[in-house]
Amino acid sequence: MSLGLCDGYARRKFFELADIAGNLRKGKPAHQISQIAQGAVKRIDAIFDIEREISGLDSVARLAARQDLSRPLVDSLHGWLPAERAKLSGHNEVAKAINDLFER
């Protein structure tokens, strides 16, 4: 079950935009930290947690777990991100990350 591209790549872009400590080290003010990016990281991490839990199961069991556990999270993410994207300028870095997620 995919988010639309390599899931790690998708998370990395959002993580960079949500990395409070990293941005503060770079001298960026805290108000530039995106709540949307933080929400995306949290949601993607929940999907990754499921993948870690089902690692080692046979393919049938992994598919069943993904359908039961991951699909609702992925569907929710796919509904939430476009709604959040609609609130942002096209030049916003989070908007670009969301666009990238759905265009790959």
Image (spheres, rainbow, N blue to C red):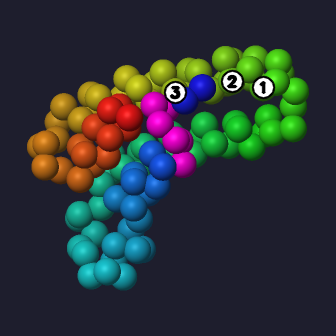
Residue at left 67%, top 17%? Answer: 67
| Quadrant assignment, res 51 | top right
In depth, the one of 9 and 31 nearer the eye is 9
> Residue 53 at x, y = what percent?
78, 39
Identify the element where label 1 is drawn: helix
Q: Quadrant of the C terminus?
A: top left
Q: Amino acid at mark 2?
A: Arg
Residue at the disc numbered 2: 66
Distance from Cα at disc 3 to Cα at disc 2: 10 Å
> Which residue, given by chain and number where applicable, does mark 3 sit on?
74
Is residue 6 located in the magenta-colored stretch of the structure? yes
- Please tell me the numbered disc located at residue 9: none
Front in this rendered view, residue 28 or 92: 92
Rendering coords of residue 58 (x, y %):
87, 27
Q: Is residue 101 left or right of residue 2?
A: left
Task: Residue 26 in the image: state x and y as whole percent.
Answer: 31, 80
Q: Which mark is residue 62?
A: 1
Depth check: 71 or 35 in front? 71
Q: Is residue 50 above or below residue 58?
A: below
Label 3 with label 1: CB-CB less than 8 Å: no
From the viewer's perspective, tell me whether residue 68 is left or right of residue 54.
Answer: left
Query: Residues in magenta?
Result: 3-8
Three-letter code, disc 3: Val
Q: If the image is split into quadrants, where does the N terminus sit? A: top right
Which secondary structure class fits the magenta region best? loop
Q: Amino acid at mark 1?
A: Arg
Assess whether mark 1 and mark 2 are in contact (beta carbons under 8 angstroms): yes
Residue under the point 79% across and 35% down: 54
